[in-house]
């Protein structure tokens, strides 16, 4: 079937309803395109052909029995793929780590199960930074993913495979996870709509945990509506994750309302931040103007403690990661280094050889930060900073409905260009405070940078559990920018 790659959810569903094509044909077209193009992109770690065709056949049966696509589910017949930290029974879940190279999921994550339940056609598992530590997907043990806009450049990370797959039309929508920016930054680098919902909107059950108090799953798509439909499919309370909330929001409900009357917060300190590239700044300012032209009221807001978010994150994140990753002990889970006579040396060698350098750095940092005497100096103050940042956001939303900000200080960089960890960490200077506070944030493609001619996203940040606000503002901006195109080399 021709033209699958550029189709959105509605177009697929109209085609299915009018019998222009079957769900099996959609699945086959997607699989063929992956076979043809993914050598260049390397978004996929595993392609689940059999599962895809099975799911497609079920949809075709439901259609034949007289059901409409919408009755089958919000993403019926839509090719979808999952970051490789999400369990899907019978497939590998490697987290792009040697540690889990041979791990096969015995069960399915709630968000993945819901996506398939909602009619998604599961295409496979997507590359990422090892255990989601990183901003470039370069730390994957299984090779790097290329940015479809420029194959010499990174797609961002850690959900780089999820972003690249959508930008290259190797899936209609994908799921990623975001602990400090891992959905939004690759969204910005690849020109895709990339949503990190409020903490608690999507169940984390079955996602390999990095920072349990920060991790949140969300969609990538080439339109705001497709992202909203996907979030509709995966959100809501799950008895298997006590931090998930009874959210039954229809995220598509106010997409047509426009920005008229919305109060859009603007944070002057963000725009003065060191390292923010002029071409990115210009695009954020232009987006503010577009929102104002559409009838929104721009208001200045302050987040006085947000500049401490990075420091707090690199305490809290490693502490939680250290605790979560202790389960990969070569006995219960994970790579087991052969030939050791005692348990101590088996543990040591397995963890030293199973984890890559960035994962080891985070684990050691977390171990140190939680040790006696050190805990009071770092962990405790970081939690206090967390409270202050959360209060900043609460105060800001007394004055506005959504905040407009940069996503990343720059556009996609070249492989190997950023080699020291601290510079890499700065990729998330505008995204981390949102995870710390628990709010929702999304990256909306807002054109190409004037200097690099690469995609730039603008960030819309909503109040907690009012993610529909950011969707509304994003839809208003999409009216101006148009839907996200496929990367030119893949169009
Ligand atoms: N880049 C950040 C980090 O390395 C965020 C990662 C993420 O959101 N998973 O921790």
Image (tube, grey):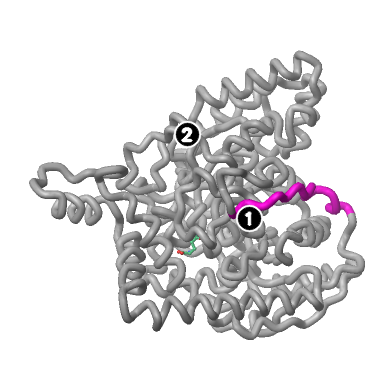
Q: The C terminus is located in which quarter?
A: top right
- The Cα–Cα distance between marks 1 and 2, rounded to whole angstroms, is 21 Å
**Residue 211, percent from left and from top:** 47, 60
Q: The N terminus is located in which quarter?
A: top right
Apparent side of residue 92 relative to residue 11 in the rendered image (left or right): left
Apparent side of residue 414 relative to residue 305 in the rendered image (left or right): left
Q: Say above or below: 117 vs 45.
A: above
Asked whether 392 falls inside the magenta stretch, the response is: no
**Residue 386, percent from left and from top:** 56, 75
Which residue is labeled 1 in the image?
Answer: 200
- Rendering quarter of residue 61: top right
Magenta-tinted stretch: 243-256
Q: Front-most of 110 and 63?
A: 110
| Residue 182 shows up from this direction | no
Which residue is labeled 2 in the image?
Answer: 107
| x 53%, y 40%: residue | 109
**Residue 334, percent from left and from top:** 30, 44
């Amino acid at each position: 079937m021709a033209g699958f790659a550029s189709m959105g959810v509605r177009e697929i569903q109209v085609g299915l309803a009018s019998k222009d094509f079957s769900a099996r044909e959609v699945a086959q077209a997607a699989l063929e395109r992956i076979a043809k193009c993914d050598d260049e992109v390397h978004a996929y770690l595993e392609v689940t052909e059999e599962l895809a065709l099975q799911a497609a056949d079920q949809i075709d049966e439901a259609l034949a029995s007289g059901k409409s696509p919408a009755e089958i589910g919000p993403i019926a017949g839509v090719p979808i793929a999952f970051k490789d930290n999400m369990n899907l029974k019978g497939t590998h879940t490697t987290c792009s780590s040697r540690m889990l190279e041979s791990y096969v999921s015995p069960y399915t994550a709630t968000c993945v199960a819901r996506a398939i339940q909602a009619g998604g056609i599961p295409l496979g598992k997507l590359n990422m930074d090892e255990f989601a530590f990183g901003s470039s997907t370069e730390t994957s043990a299984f090779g790097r993913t290329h940015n479809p806009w420029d194959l010499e450049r990174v797609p961002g990370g850690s959900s780089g495979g999820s972003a690249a797959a959508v930008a290259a039309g190797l899936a209609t929508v994908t799921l990623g996870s975001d602990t400090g920016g891992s959905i939004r930054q690759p969204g910005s680098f690849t020109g895709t709509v990339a949503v990190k919902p409020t903490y608690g909107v999507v169940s984390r059950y079955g996602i390999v945990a990095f920072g349990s108090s920060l991790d949140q799953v969300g969609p990538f798509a080439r339109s705001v509506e497709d992202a909203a439909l996907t979030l509709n499919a995966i959100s809501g309370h799950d008895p298997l994750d006590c931090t998930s909330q009874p959210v039954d929001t229809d995220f598509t409900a106010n997409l047509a309302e426009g920005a008229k009357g919305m109060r859009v917060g603007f944070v002057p300190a963000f725009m003065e931040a060191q390292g923010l590239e002029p071409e990115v700044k210009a695009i954020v300012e232009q987006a503010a103007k577009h929102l104002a032209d559409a009838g929104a009221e721009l208001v200045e807001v302050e987040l006085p403690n947000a500049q401490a978010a990075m420091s707090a994150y690199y305490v809290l994140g490693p502490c939680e990661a250290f605790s979560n990753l202790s389960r990969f002990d070569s006995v219960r889970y994970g790579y087991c280094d052969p030939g050791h006579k005692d348990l101590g040396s088996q543990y040591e060698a397995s963890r030293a050889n199973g984890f890559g350098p960035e994962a080891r750095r985070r684990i050691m940092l977390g171990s140190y930060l939680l040790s006696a005497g050190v805990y009071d100096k770092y962990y405790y103050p970081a939690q206090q900073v967390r409270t202050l940042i959360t209060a900043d956001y609460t105060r800001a939303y007394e004055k506005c409905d959504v905040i407009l900000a940069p996503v990343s200080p720059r556009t996609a960089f070249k492989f190997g260009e950023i080699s020291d960890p601290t510079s890499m960490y700065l990729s998330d200077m505008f995204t981390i405070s949102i995870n710390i506070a628990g709010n929702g944030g999304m990256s909306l493609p807002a054109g190409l940078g004037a200097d690099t001619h690469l995609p730039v996203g603008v960030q819309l940040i909503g109040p907690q559990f009012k993610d529909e606000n950011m969707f509304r503002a994003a839809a208003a901006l999409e009216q101006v920018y148009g839907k996200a195109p496929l990367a030119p080399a893949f169009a």
